[in-house]
Image: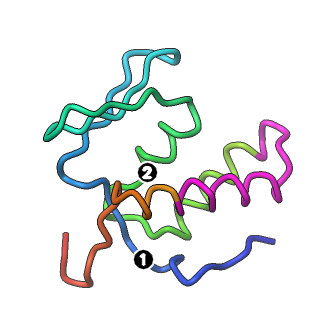
Amino acid sequence: MLETNKSDSLKMKLNDNLFLYKLDDSFMWLFNIENGEHYKLNNSSHFILSLFDGKKTVGEIQKVYIKKYANEGIAEPILLKDFNELLDHLMRNNFLNTLKNNDK
């Protein structure tokens, strides 16, 4: 059973200064268009970041992530830990904006 967090009902999106890019499965990046910083991504990081569109809640994103990778044979407790650690990192480093009820 999925754990719930206080952030599960939040809708979040990538900050406006961030650009997600994927050429193929071996070439995925996150660019900061303001300061030029860039981060090479793996498949799971790119997949999760692509889901933060401001329409889905964190809980919905977590469920999609768990379903995708559980079908590949990864245990749910490991997936939950990885997801929560990545979410914490993204929030601490201001990669995500939390949307208010009236934001679109």
| 10 Å crowding of disc 1: few (<14), some (14-19), many (20+) | some
**Quadrant for the C terminus in the image:** bottom left
Task: Place residue 81 in its image quadrant.
Answer: bottom right
Q: Is residue 71 above or below residue 26?
A: below
Give how far across and how far down residue 103 sits, in percent: 19, 75
**Mark 2 secondary-structure assignment:** helix
Q: Is residue 60 above or below residue 8?
A: above
Left or right for 4, reference 22: right
The answer to which of 26 and 34 lies nearer the viewer is 34
Q: Marks 2 and 1, Cα distance to the nearest angstrom?
A: 13 Å
Q: Position of residue 59 (x, y in %)?
A: 55, 70
Q: What's the residue type where badge 2 is placed?
A: Leu
- Nearer-the-camera pick, 31 or 5: 31
Q: Which mark is residue 51?
A: 2
Indicate left or right for 85 with 89 as reference.
Answer: right
Q: Secondary structure at mark 1?
A: loop
Q: At 18% from the left edge and 47% from the top edge, which residue is drawn?
A: 17
Colour pattern: rainbow
Q: Residue under circle 1?
A: 10
- Magenta residue check for 75: yes
